[in-house]
Amino acid sequence: MPENSLRLALTGDSILMRRLNSRTDPVVQPLFDLIRGADIGFTNLEVLPNDHRGDPAQESGGSHFAAPSWVVDELVEAGFHLFAAATNHALDYSISGLLAAIETLEDRGVAFAGVGRNLERARMPVYHTHPKATVAMLSCASTFAKGQQAGAQTADLPGRPGLNPLRYDTVHEITAEQMATLRQMADQLGLEKQRQARIQLGFGFPPDDPAIFPLGEMNFREASRTALRTSARKKDVDGIIRWLHETKPVSDLSLVSVHAHEQGTNAQGETDKEVPAEFLPVFCRRMIDEGADLVVGHGPHLLRGMEIYKGRPIFYSLGNFIGQNELVARLPSDSYERFRVDPNTTPVLAYRQRTDHDRKGFPSDSRFWESVVPICRFEGNRLAGIDIHPVSLGLGEAAHSRGRPRLAEGRHAQDILGRFATLSASFGTELDIRDGIAKVILPGGRSA
């Protein structure tokens, strides 16, 4: 291997609530030795390491993911250097909880990005320097509740702490007949009159596109057939690109992390969790066009395919890496109300009721318990090879044991890699699967 060859290990969502024992547990140690053997490790920090400090928000990312501050130490020991922090759980404990998590990360001196005390701080890149190379990372999220995005500061007021947003617009395309019915309903229910009144009062604005008919929070447009169309907002894309350009003169490689649950439609026209929403491939390719060397996606908690675009890798979702969401130690009252669980129920038993004793939710679908760890090799800033390692999170074990990642073996490894190969084939990516590892066929037929 050339001396200037840099090995970068990538993972998806790390939902860590208990000690990893990454150096002593024989089940997980081989995987973490592999990660530690790389020069730089990246993970998505899906929890708030705030020791449950802060104010529980009514709107959470599904569960309130507060965690002990020492989970950061566990992940550092496990081989990680770059932490993406823009996720739909970043404001689970409101601004106060986010600031507590930021303090934890700052006190430990780890390289994190995607959240900040104002919009510019949330957008800013972070750098990790290895003797072989300096890697810059930007982190953004398209999935979050309204108001969780960071706000810009002005000349006379500070900005709002929050996450780096990648907002997108959704348009529902419907037929002429459907549009006529929708307009009739809006008129008869008084909804269109209310919309016009808001515009007249200065609290609303007509859509920029006159072809759009807005109804509540939804936008409709007439088309030949029904379809769901999404597009990233230019303001956010431009804001992210501004800081991406900043990284180019002062780093060797630039990584863009995007946390996105949004899903698209498959070849059969059906909504499919394994397919990224329409705006995501457009955004990811734009990042490569603007200078990113790789884009790493996560969010839906299961695998999506990967693409080699202009010689650069785009991973649309690496799925779960550590999945201990059933081990949250404390839950606020809003969680009990949302799950429809008696508030006197303790947290673990509340999760058991939520999943109907593993008959629904994450424990009922093996895809949430399978992942991959790509190790990308760069020579200078040229992608020289990608090895894909299959990972199992131990579905079938007790709740306190599953969720710990380990290298998959045998038939299970082949099945995970085969599924990832199928997902990636839709993006024109080929994998060479041998001996429990997949190598990506790079342009020109290389699978180095």
Image (tube, helix red, strand yellow):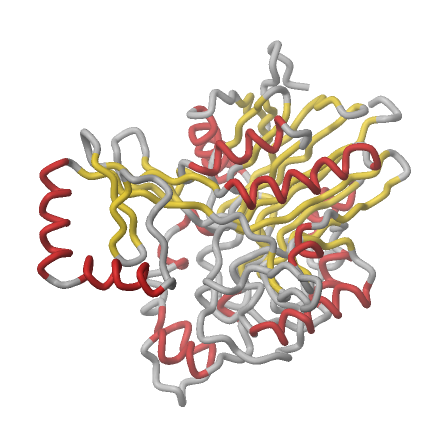
- Residue 64: x and y in percent read 51, 71
Q: Is residue 103 left or right of residue 310?
A: right
Q: Where's residue 379, x and y in %? A: 79, 23
Pick the quarter of the image with the C terminus: top right
Residue 138 higher or lower than 162, as above or below: above
Please determine whether, in this image, residue 8 is positioned above or below residue 354: above
Q: Quadrant of residue 353?
A: bottom left
Q: Is residue 282 above or below residue 301?
A: above
Residue most extreme to the top: 444
Q: Position of residue 338 (x, y in %)?
A: 36, 74
The residue drawn where x is 75% and y is 64% is 105
Would residue 128 appear left or right of 424 to someone viewing this image? right
Can residue 411 be seen here? The reply is no
Residue 246 visible in the current orientation: yes
The front one of 29 and 259 is 259
Please state which of residues 288 and 156 is positioned toward the viewer in this rendering. Answer: 156
Q: Quadrant of the N terminus?
A: top right
| Residue at the (81%, 64%) spot, across then down | 108
